Image (spheres, rainbow, N blue to C red):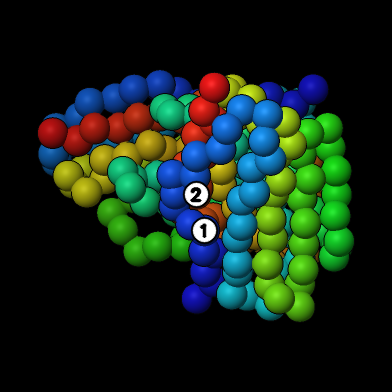
Amino acid sequence: SQTIHQWPATLVQPVGSPLSLECTVEGTSNPNLYWYRQAAGRGLQLLFYSVGIGQISSEVPQNLSASRPQDRQFILSSKKLLLSDSGFYLCAWSGGAYGYTFGSGTRLTVV
Amino acid sequence: QKEVEQNSGPLSVPEGAIASLNCTYSDRGSQSFFWYRQYSGKSPELIMSIYSNGDKEDGRFTAQLNKASQYVSLLIRDSQPSDSATYLCAVEEGGGADGLTFGKGTHLIIQP
């Protein structure tokens, strides 16, 4: 069966510090991968998606970036965090008739 | 810009009653529709998917789709306290891998 792993679960970072969140998927090959953010009082916002290694599409201009170095690995990064980057970050994968499956999420607080 | 609208609630329903959640979407090109349940502090989990007009039933859940009216709904029969959560409506443009567009969710409270 397919599983998706996301870490860390919680993170507190100072403004201006770098960020790296990692997501890996098991039990499937060539999945479509997504990074979403859920800010307080707001809906899920699509940040990036990837249909294959090295292929990244950005939905929202921001100081975040994403990379897909391996088929089942998706990384969200920032060189310098802003207060507005705080939120609940969710990785998801899609494959066929299963809809979209989300990881357990990372709650990021920028202080 | 694609938009998905939901009443934020809270929607309060007595235990054992039917909970009715509604969603409208703006993009007529949308082909796939999903309902997710999200408990506080947790990630969304898929409850139902629906792709064609009409009703789709799965246990206590029924999803309804009307593409002409750009309207999706979720009915929860015999509501239980464990159904208390935020329900997210999501749509996907047909054939694309460019992700889901979500509504902000409806907060459902089942009163014992």
Q: Nearer the viewer, residue A106 or B54?
A: B54
Judge left or right: residue B108 versus residue A17. Answer: right
The local crowd at label 1, few if under 14, some if 14 to 19, many if 20 or more residues have their Cα within 10 Å, is: many
| Residue depicted at 59% across the width and 22% down the height | B82
| Residue depicted at 40% across the width and 62% down the height | A60
In the rendered structure, which amino acid carries the disc numbered 1? Gln
Q: Nearer the viewer, residue B23 or B98?
A: B23
Judge left or right: residue B58 versus residue A46. Answer: right
In the rendered image, the quadrant that contains the C terminus of chain A is: top left
Q: Position of residue A30 (x, y in %)?
A: 74, 42
Judging by the rendered image, the residue that carries numbered circle 1 is: B6
Q: Position of residue A56 (x, y in %)?
A: 54, 55
Q: Position of residue A104 (x, y in %)?
A: 52, 26
Cα distance in 3D space between marks 1 and 2: 6 Å
> Could you say which quadrant of the image residue A70 lies in?
top right
Query: Which numbered dot is residue A83?
Result: none
Judging by the rendered image, the residue that carries numbered circle 2 is: B105
In the rendered structure, which amino acid carries the disc numbered 2? Gly
Would you say residue A70 is visible in this rendering? no
Marker count (numbered)? 2
Chain letter for mark 2, please.
B
